[in-house]
Amino acid sequence: MMTMEEAKLFKERWKLVNEKINEEVRNTPIEAKLQQLAIMFDTGQVFDWTNSQTEIEIVRNRWQQLKDRINA
C-alpha cells in the first residue's frame, strides 16, 4: 500500500513526465508529425484496420439518435 506522501510524489513525477511529453509534441516539426500520421495510416491498411461502410453507418446512426434525443 502507498502512503499519502508516496502518492503525492508519484503524482508529481507523472506530472513532470506529462509536461515533458507535451513539450516534445509542441516542438516536433510538422513534417515529422505528418510522417508519423502517414505511417499510422499505412499500418492501419496493412493490418486491415479499416471500417466497413456498414460499421460507419451504424456509428453515424447512433450519433444521430443521441443528437435527436438531446434536441428533443
Image (tube, helix red, strand yellow):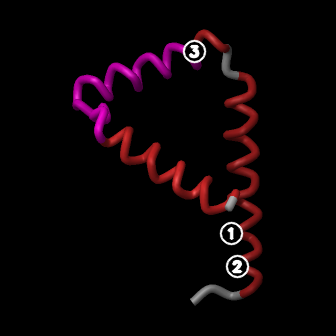
Q: Main secondary structure of the magenta part?
A: helix
What range is drawn magenta here? 33-54
What's the residue at 70%, 79% (across, down)? 6
Q: Which percent across, then down, holds residue 22?
A: 72, 38
Q: Secondary structure at mark 3?
A: helix
Q: What amino acid is labelled 1 in the image?
A: Phe
Q: What amino acid is labelled 3 in the image?
A: Ala
Q: Which residue is label 3 attached to?
A: 32
Instruction: State if disc 1 and disc 2 touch (CB < 8 Å).
Output: yes
Q: Secondary structure at mark 2?
A: helix
- 51 inside magenta stretch: yes
Residue 6, numbered circle: 2
- Can you tell which quarter of the image residue 8 is in? bottom right
Residue 70, numbered circle: none
Instruction: State if disc 1 and disc 3 touch (CB < 8 Å).
Output: no
36 in relation to 70, above or below: above
Q: In the displayed structure, does residue 43 sit left or right of residue 38? A: left
What's the residue at 53%, 49% (across, down)? 64
Q: In the displayed structure, does residue 52 sit left or right of residue 10? A: left
Mark 3 and mark 1: Cα distance apart in space: 32 Å
